[in-house]
Image: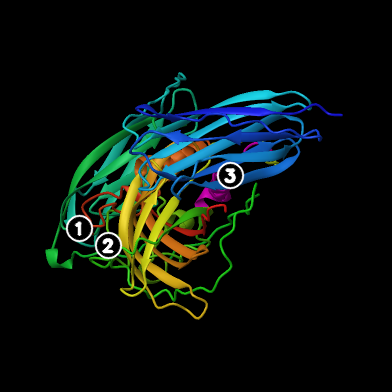
Amino acid sequence: MARTTRFHWILLCFAGATVGGLGCSNTTTSEESTGSLSLDLELAPGIVINEVLWEIRGGDMAPMSGVIDTSAPGSTASVEVFGLPPGDDYLVELTAIDEGGELACRGDARFDVEAGTATDVMVMLNCKAAERLGGVRVEGKPNLCPELVKAVVSPLETSFGNDIDLSALAVDAEGDPFFYSWSGSGGAIDDPFEPTATFTCHQVGPGSVTIRILGGSFECQDSWTVPINCVGDPSLQMCLPGGGECSDGQISDVVPCCDLSAPDQEDACTGTESLENPTSCTATGNTVVHELTVLELAPSCNDGYDLDGCDGSSCARGGLAPGEGLDGVDSALTGIAPTWSGVGGDLGGLNQAFSDALCGLTTFQTGFECMSPIAKLRLFFFVDANLEEGCANVRVTDGLVTSDAILNLGDPTPTGTVCASGTLGTIPLTLVGFSGTLENAVVRMTVSEAGFSDGLVGATVDSDTAIAVAELLIEGGGAVMSQTFDINDELTQDTTQACNAISTAFLIGGRAQTPTP
């Protein structure tokens, strides 16, 4: 007869000072060679947790997960799970979010299960609000950067719509490869990666032209800036002319490490719903919490939204920035797929990173096998829908960064789905260890009590975030990304400013978090 397998779980919560602790309930016994777990939760006064999410993964066992409903008076965050096969390197993860969506508690621990042996595991459940500080880790590698030895810009003044000739010469003492990069304000540059190029004036007034010599990384560069001036009729200034149509490229499929799906439901959006938010919306108190389960690049650069109100560009675009999509759609991240492929990259790697983060497992450098657990990407949508007023109060949070908005709700379909549309503003997004945000976010998505689906989000990503994520996904990716910015993150149509962000469009979906009975 197999000996009794028992687990004691002790969890502590912290939010600056200690928030509370988890005590152990009585163990259970079994005649089988499996294990069980029991846990209870106590929280300090003022902290209200309506549910605790748990998940156990490891061994040859399929992942086990559930939700502890603690919303009813007198309910405790306690659960007993039986049926863990013997094995090594199990992982348990716990997540709790307070009812306001402003405090997140997370913790995990690894443990082994051995038949007939009682195993004690301690999990520290940390609770915190918004991050206040960051850090940096720096490693140096000696390298002699390329040097700019000559730059010629002529003439220094011309009229609106006419050209200025550009030429440059650079050398690298070690013979390392490098490339030229022209950029400027007040106009557009053709052949920006050639030693000779042409600048065309699109903005009346003072401007500048800069030549950069880029080595093996974005930081290894030499540059020179020359002031120029464009003269003419200021009434001609509006949005810059379009840079041609965008082109789609190959984006490889992902290898999902878990079930990443949204509800199969009737699409309630037509693509014409208003993106202007209502000024007010009466709360009903019936909030449904949805968790993001689908996040991937829109497959075409013609999918998205006209964020800047320009058929061309709202800033002095240059470099590798692709042209806008149909009807002025801003979706440059998808539009650089052909360029990315040309330098040995694949935007499918970004979709794979999203998929891995949503599953908490990674395929990175492992071929097509889901290997060691990683930190999960968890994004929650708190939706309080008021069908009578045709609006919804929405809170988007990852537990650290929170954004509130009032969205429009369309008329329900016969199946009960509705279209939610409007401006979300900021969406927190942590990927491959880098905490960033999507800004200027707008959305149309189909919502029901089961979750949301067929969502299309358009947004901008600031230059620092875009470069950092690109560099983590592919060596040298940051240098390429720095030449692809197509939009001003203030959306001001100020053509005297260089572009400082990249436009994006994502497909999203999610499932409602239903408390376990």
Q: Which residue is found at the position 49% from the left and 65% from the top? A: 449
- Of residues 320 and 501, the one nearer the viewer is 501
- Of residues 506 and 391, the one nearer the viewer is 391
Q: Is 488 on the left-hand or right-hand side of 350?
A: left
Labelled pair 1, 2 in contact (Cβ < 8 Å): yes
Quadrant in the picture for residue 280: bottom left
Dot 1 corresponds to which residue?
203
Q: SS of the residue at dot 2?
A: loop
Label 2: few (<14), some (14–19) or many (≥20) C-alpha neighbours in 10 Å: many
Magenta highlight range: 339-366
Image coordinates of residue 399 in percent, x first then y, are 40, 42
- Looking at the image, residue 239 lies above or below residue 411: above
The mark lying in front, picked from 3 and 2, is: 3
Label 3 or label 1, whichever comes before in sequence order: 1
Give the position of the N terminus as an image quadrant.
top right
In the image, which disc is placed on residue 356? 3
Image coordinates of residue 172 in percent, x first then y, are 44, 27
Query: Would you say residue 113 is visible in this rendering?
Result: yes
Q: Is residue 365 magenta?
A: yes
Label 1 or label 2, whichever comes before in sequence order: 1
Image coordinates of residue 426 in percent, x first then y, are 33, 51
Q: Amino acid at mark 3?
A: Asp
Q: SS of the residue at dot 3?
A: helix
- Looking at the image, residue 130 lies above or below residue 112: below
In the image, which disc is placed on residue 240? 2
Q: Amino acid at mark 1?
A: Gln
CA gap between label 3 and label 1 equals 45 Å
